[in-house]
Image: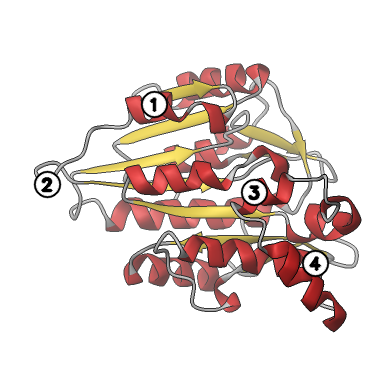
Amino acid sequence: MATEDPRLFEDDGFLLPEVGDWATTKHRKIGYYSSLFATSMKRKWQCRVYIDLFACAGKSRLRESNKIVPGSPLLALSVDDPFDKYVFCEGNPDHMTALKERIKKYFPDRDCSFIEGDTNQCLDRLFSVVPQFSRAFRGLAFCFVDPYRKAELAFSTLKEIAERLYVDFLVLIPSYMDIGRNEKHYTRDDNKSLDRFLGTDSWRAAWANRKRRSQNFGVFITDVFCQQMKTLRYRYENPDDLELIRMETGQHLPLYHLGFFSRSKLGLHFWRETKRNTTDQLTLW
């Protein structure tokens, strides 16, 4: 599994964005899956690529406890069998600067590329740094998608990556913390942000029919997103494969879902193993 290097939990003097304590659950699953993926695929593929579409600063400070924790980039970089190539996308210049400095400090020998700007507008640059794969040089990618807000991700971005690469996705879907809390805002006729996030506006008519059943809006949209991933030939068998992340303290209110998408049965098997082995486990956090 990912190395629990104590340096990754220390204040290194670089920018530390604040996050909620529930991020530790998400990070635990990301670290476990990244390690499982990288090690298991090491001898089956000639090149393994890790892509982080919203990489942030590499470390964060937990708002409630004040602890420092590594984010998804450092977790992926610290796996026992590192990926052959890392690509980090980030739109905030200050976050990108901190991330670059941290990688230079902790992982100077890794093959990393950095794409600064709106991920949805930077795909040409992303594809230019990913190795060119062929039948003679086979590559597999794992893409983590954790937008700060739903409006920052266009479904067309995932579609283009899926068309260009053989790639598995792990996507944070803000089902409760954003979508579910703002139903009136997102269902307005002049608000097209969910259309962009889902890659379709067909959800509007479907929701008009379903809302009489008192279904949670965020859960409904999450299922629509998963069904949209199926149109890209990704496996989505049932909602049980989604991971619901809750607040770590208080009433443990639901916040968002993690959705894993692979075209391979093995990928789904790895995700189920990750869910099973990262639930209610003690960590350095």
| Among the two numbered marks 1 and 3 on one chain, the one whose residue lies closer to the N terminus | 1
- Element marked by disc 2: loop
Q: Residue furthest bottom?
A: 213
| Label 2 – label 3 distance at C-alpha | 33 Å
Image quadrant holding the N terminus, namely bottom left
Say which residue appears at 51% left-offset and 70% top-offset: 277
Is label 2 in contact with label 3 (beta carbons under 8 Å)?
no
User: In the depicted view, which residue is nearer to us: 40 or 213?
Assistant: 213
* Viewer-nearest of discs 2 and 1: 2
Residue labelled with disc 1: 112
Q: Amino acid at mark 1?
A: Cys
| Label 1 – label 3 distance at C-alpha | 28 Å
- List x then y, in percent, for residue 125: 41, 23
Circle 1 Cα neighbour tier, 10 Å, few/some/many (<14 / 14–19 / ≥20): many
Mark number displayed over residue 217: 4
- List x then y, in percent, for residue 53: 53, 37
Circle 4 Cα neighbour tier, 10 Å, few/some/many (<14 / 14–19 / ≥20): some
| Label 4 – label 1 distance at C-alpha | 39 Å
Residue 50 visible: yes
| Location of residue 10 with respect to 62 vertically, above or below | above
- Horizontal arrangement in the rendering, residue 130 relative to residue 268 (left or right): left
Residue 1 visible: no
Say which residue appears at 52% left-offset and 44% top-offset: 156
Q: Amino acid at mark 3?
A: Phe
- List x then y, in percent, for residue 157: 51, 41
Mark number displayed over residue 197: 3
Residue labelled with disc 2: 135
- Element marked by disc 1: strand
